[in-house]
Image: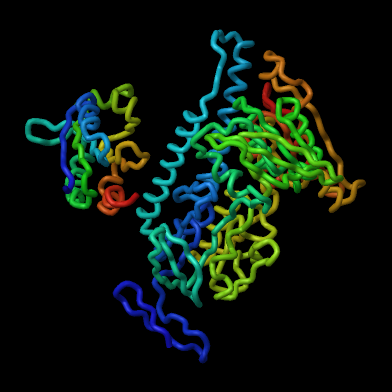
């Protein structure tokens, strides 16, 4: 049998049925690999039940060298900085509108990238620190180390100095999340940046090419343009795959009319550096997806937002037999977030066929821990989860897209009610009167129950949250009609 | 060279003291003023100070510990005092690592584990 030494305590191993040795007693009740939304929520919940918990979190630096602290994608390079920068762009627009409302200022308004970025990073730093205090206060052990499985119930943690330690646990939770995908073309890793780099970029990105048509691409393109930068989005085929395409096209139209350039049906094939600098100058060569046409363009920054890949391929899952989808890297789990290995669970963006959202990961993590240690049976409900895309014209949605509803129920069984609206706040500054839009999709066969809610307009996220609760309660069109509107707000539509 | 302690009373003296040690890691504990018998008007500060002092030996080499009395209770309660406005302090006691978002506030300062974490970890 094999002896593993952890610090000064020798570990007793037992042969079980002549198979691989399994530790007889474990260092921890639960080891969480990944200190992001899902991992931290689960760890803190487990500590409440007096379990001995360890969190391992480690950020592999980006090709450009960016790294960050505890908290995961959402806190460091996702939702939080994104929303703050989106807000910065909205404030720019508000400043323009304000003149029509009587505010007088003579100077032209300019934006300082460094001031914004420093404030955002400072706030993120306070969140990183807050998580560390919360973990320590809850007696959760945290190590800034890269975790990987080396054998049954056993994990190796390697810190940034290369020091390795072995730990064992009764159960494990994989919550390693994802990282941006690169194109695999010459110059991509050397010269391009991703969302991992954008929010801490120590210089203004300047004229930017955003490659991709995901919500990450459109949100970033949106706020960069809102801050006054020259932005182009290069799209391979459609916008916002997986979202209601009617809404996706309206978002694209709005962005185009408000200064974002789009290059459709092209993909980059080469990125070269013309001049070094912060920012430098880059030459991008792209090929059409429909023919042989080649185009070239010059930009200060190229931001890749073509997708994210799960961090599941280099954490030793093969050593413990956890199945992953070889093509996508995602981990299939049952409806209790359990992998094919009974003592190993997973939550968050790495799950196959589940929504990649922070609140979903948090909910799944917490409920899982309560099932494990508090004897509850509640499972995470992945249906009717509301989302919002923070493009310059925000889009909130809950439930089915029009296409999916038609596919599932048949066109004759669904009814779509829709309306354009003109937010009162937009009237005075003469902003667009035909862009904001809302629609609901109803199931005729089920009392016209509302099965899809979509809104395009300011504060879409705030509006959608309440309607999501109503949909969860099974609201019908009639009930919606009978609800008196609040006036004058966008949500009354 | 180990660590050293400096003392300051009031905002201006604090800023001068911090500037004097510019370039070295600076940790600061902000407490309410003490009376003639050496007791502070701030009961949490009375609890926190010995806990913090017991952990000072964990301070990294070259660092400076500034013990700062902010003022009397009336001054502190003013929502516009310089500590609140410029240093963004929200309560006393506050123990912080100057120039970073890392800080411990009120009951957090009673916990030796957290104080040690602030002093020793990045």
Q: Residue at x 39, y 79 (%)?
A: A4
Q: Say if A175 sits above or below A18 in the image.
A: above
Q: Quadrant of residue A390?
A: top right
The percent position of residue B58, horizontal first and vertical second, equals 22, 52
The answer to whether B68 is drawn above or below residue A109 in the figure is below
Q: Position of residue A135 (x, y in %)?
A: 40, 54
- Number of on-image labels: 0
Q: Which quadrant: the C terminus of chain A?
A: top right
Q: Is residue A71 left or right of residue B23?
A: right
Q: Residue at x 30, y 46 (%)?
A: B108
Query: Extreme bottom residue here?
Result: A18
Quadrant in which the N terminus of chain A is drawn: bottom left
Q: Is residue B117 left or right of residue A401?
A: left
Image x and y of residue B44, in percent: 23, 40
Q: Is residue A214 left or right of residue B36?
A: right
Residue nearer the viewer, A472 or A184: A184
Q: Nearer the viewer, residue A386 or A486?
A: A386
Question: A326 or A265: which is nearer to us?
Answer: A265
Question: Which of the 4 quarters of the picture holds residue A382?
Answer: bottom right
Mark yes or no: residue A330 visible: yes
- Residue sitting at the far right: A412
In the orientation shown, which residue stands out farthest toward the front? A274
The foreground one among A304 and A141 is A304
Identity of the residue drawn at 29% across and 23% down:
B81
Residue A265's image quarter? Answer: top right
The answer to whether residue A440 is seen in the rendering is no
Please provide percent x and percent y for residue A356: 64, 52
Q: Which residue is pictured at 65% across the width and 55% down the height?
A: A381
Q: How is the image coloured?
A: rainbow
């Amino acid at each position: 049998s094999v002896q593993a030494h952890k610090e000064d305590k020798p570990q007793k191993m037992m042969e079980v049925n002549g198979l691989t040795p399994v530790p007889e007693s474990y260092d921890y009740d639960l080891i969480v690999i990944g200190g992001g939304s899902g991992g931290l929520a689960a760890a803190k919940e487990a500590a409440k039940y007096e379990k001995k918990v360890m969190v391992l979190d480690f950020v592999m630096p980006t090709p450009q060298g960016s790294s960050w602290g505890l908290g995961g994608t959402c806190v460091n390079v996702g939702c939080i900085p994104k929303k703050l920068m989106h807000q910065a762009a909205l404030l720019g627009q508000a400043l323009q509108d304000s003149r029509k409302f009587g505010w007088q200022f003579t100077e032209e308004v300019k934006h300082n990238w460094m001031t914004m970025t420093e404030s955002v990073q400072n706030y993120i730093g306070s969140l990183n620190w807050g998580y560390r205090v919360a973990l320590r206060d809850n007696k959760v052990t945290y190590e800034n180390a890269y975790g990987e499985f080396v054998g049954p119930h056993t994990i190796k943690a390697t810190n940034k100095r290369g020091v390795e330690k072995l730990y064992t646990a009764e159960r494990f939770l994989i919550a390693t999340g994802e990282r941006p995908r690169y194109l695999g073309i010459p110059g991509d890793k050397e010269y391009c940046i991703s969302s991992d780099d954008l929010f801490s970029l120590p210089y203004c990105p300047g004229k930017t090419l955003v490659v991709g048509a995901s919500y990450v691409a459109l949100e970033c393109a949106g706020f960069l343009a809102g801050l006054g930068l020259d932005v182009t989005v290069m799209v391979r085929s459609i916008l916002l795959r997986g979202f209601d395409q009617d809404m996706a096209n309206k978002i694209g139209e709005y962005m185009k009319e408000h200064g974002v350039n789009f290059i459709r049906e092209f993909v980059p094939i080469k990125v070269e550096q013309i001049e070094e600098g912060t920012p430098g100058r880059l030459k991008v060569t792209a090929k059409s997806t429909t023919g042989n046409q080649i185009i070239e363009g010059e930009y200060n920054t190229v931001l890749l937002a073509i997708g994210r890949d799960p961090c599941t391929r280099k954490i030793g899952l093969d050593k413990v037999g956890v199945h992953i989808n070889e093509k996508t890297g995602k981990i299939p789990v049952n409806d209790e977030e359990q992998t094919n290995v009974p003592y190993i669970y997973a939550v968050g963006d790495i799950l196959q066929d589940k929504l990649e959202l922070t609140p979903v990961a948090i909910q799944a993590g917490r409920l899982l821990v309560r099932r494990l240690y508090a004897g509850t049976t509640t499972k995470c409900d992945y249906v009717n989860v509301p989302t919002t895309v923070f493009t310059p014209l925000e889009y909130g949605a809950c439930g089915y897209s029009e296409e999916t509803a038609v596919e599932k129920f048949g066109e004759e069984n669904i009814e779509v009610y829709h309306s354009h609206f003109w937010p009162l706040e937009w009237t005075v500054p003469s902003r667009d009167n035909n862009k904001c839009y809302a629609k609901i999709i109803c199931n005729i066969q089920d009392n016209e129950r509302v099965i899809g809610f979509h809104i395009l307009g300011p504060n879409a996220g705030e509006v959608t949250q309440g309607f999501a609760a109503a949909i969860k309660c099974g609201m019908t069109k009639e009930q919606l009609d009978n609800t008196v509107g609040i006036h004058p707000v966008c949500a009354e539509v | 060279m180990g660590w050293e302690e400096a003392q300051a009373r009031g905002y201006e003296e604090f800023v001068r003291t911090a500037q004097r040690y510019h370039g070295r890691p600076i940790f600061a504990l902000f407490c309410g003023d003490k009376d003639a018998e050496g007791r502070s008007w701030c009961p949490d500060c009375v609890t926190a100070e010995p806990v913090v002092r017991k952990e000072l030996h964990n301070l990294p080499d070259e660092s400076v510990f500034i013990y700062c009395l902010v003022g009397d209770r009336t001054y502190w309660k003013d929502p516009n005092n310089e500590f609140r406005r410029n240093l963004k302090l929200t309560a006393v006691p506050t123990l912080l690592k100057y120039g970073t978002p890392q800080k411990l506030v009120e009951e957090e300062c009673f916990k030796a584990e957290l104080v040690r974490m602030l002093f020793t970890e990045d």
